[in-house]
Image (cartoon, grey):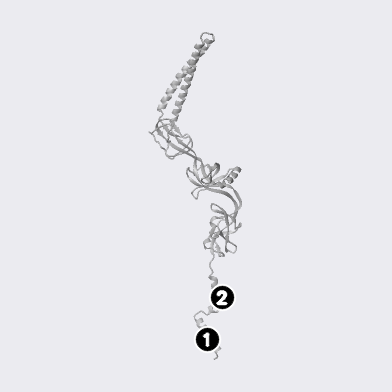
Amino acid sequence: MTLSSRSILAVAAVVAVLAAAGLGTYLITDGRALEGRKAQKGPPPVPVTVVAVAQQTMPIRLQAIGNVEAFSTVAIKARVDGQIDRVTVRDGDPVKKGALLFRVDPRPYEAALRQAEANALRDAAARDQARSQERRYQDLLDKNFVSKEAYAQIRTNAETAEATARASQAALENSRLNLEYCTIRSPLDGYIGKVLLQAGNLVKANDVNPLLVINQVRPVYVNFAVPEQNLTEVRKYMDAGPLQVAVLLPDPGAAPIDGRLIFIDNAVDPSTGTIRMRAQFDNADVKLWPGQFVNVSLRLYEQENALVIPASAVQTGPEGQYVYVIGDDLVAELRRISVQRSDGERAIVARGLAKGERVVLRGQLRLGPKTKVQLAKPAADGA
């Protein structure tokens, strides 16, 4: 037996042993099997949620922190001295214009009114008597039956009686006013604060401390400030028409409250470099309360054909902002973009994207350039 024959027999023996172990088929077809196994070892597609880039009209706004201020504030004080004998309101009550708040004991002022009425009647009678006497002496003077000096005295008496009657009438009206002042009513619609005096307390007219304070909250003001760099722009658009102001409440589920800009201060605050402004809101549902801090959005104008994506789709890396764009081949592309500004949960893109392109909204953390993706349930188009 030759050497080559021995080699062939050795190989045949090895194949027979491997076949007995069940590995013969694998070795014979090892090329195709290895290729299939390598193909199965690739990473699976990453599930992502995408949203299409929208092109729409977006408002240009200035953002600020505002403070709510009552439309009117009235400190209620007594206008006469006396003892409070009635209190009809409680702390925090809403009140209507003309509603009774307090009553000061009216009995001393009723007595003073009756005395003033009697004095007025007495002095009116004396005035009428003096007028009648003056007319008689005028006739006698015309007939030269009395001297001019006598007539002058009678006329003086009549004028004095007239002045006394007028003084008595004025005192009577003042007594009536004092009696009316014993009843203290609300001068406006609003909400009262802390009631500082209760029934039984003595009050003084125009005392330093008020009985209570009433705030009118329908309508209501919101004061805020914007940087002085925006003053020219704000005045420009305000001259063209009323500017809309929206207030965002801390409650995330609450809808914005719309008002209008009514006031721009006449000077910039040099210590802060800001200009003070004021907006007015109807506040029909009383969601705005005096002293409350709110987020204010002042709308200047509308930007047409703006490219808008959700702000959560924008990522920030060492080289700036970027998004992942998904093409028709379902492969992620890292795209550098420039965000012009943000408007709430939306980002307005200056460059880097086109209308209709699909950007990844959720699932970015597992992505890299050229990563194969699988689309999950799509989000609504636009921002």
The count of marks equals: 2
Quarter in which the C terminus is drawn: bottom right
Residue tagged by mark 1?
A: 10
Q: Residue at x 50, y 83 (%)?
A: 17
When the figure is inspected, residue 300 is found, relative to residue 10, above or below; the finding is above
Q: Residue at x 51, y 81 (%)?
A: 18
Q: Residue at x 48, y 21 (%)?
A: 166
Residue tagged by mark 2?
A: 32
Quarter in which the N terminus is drawn: bottom right
Q: Which quarter of the figure has residue 329? A: bottom right
- Mark 2 element type: helix
Q: Amino acid at mark 2?
A: Arg
Instruction: Choose between 103 and 27: the one closer to the eye.
Output: 103
- Mark 1 element type: helix
Query: Does residue 283 show up?
Result: no
Q: Residues within 10 Å of mark 2 (few under 14, many from 20)?
A: few
Q: Residues within 10 Å of mark 1 (few under 14, many from 20)?
A: few
Please state the horizontal and vertical placement of residue 48, each as a whole percent of the image. Answer: 54, 61
Please state the horizontal and vertical placement of residue 59, each as a whole percent of the image. Answer: 58, 49
Instruction: Choose between 211 and 35: the one closer to the eye.
Output: 211
Instruction: Choose between 18 and 111: the one closer to the eye.
Output: 111
Which mark sits nearer the N-terminus, 2 or 1? 1
Query: Does residue 68 show up?
Result: yes
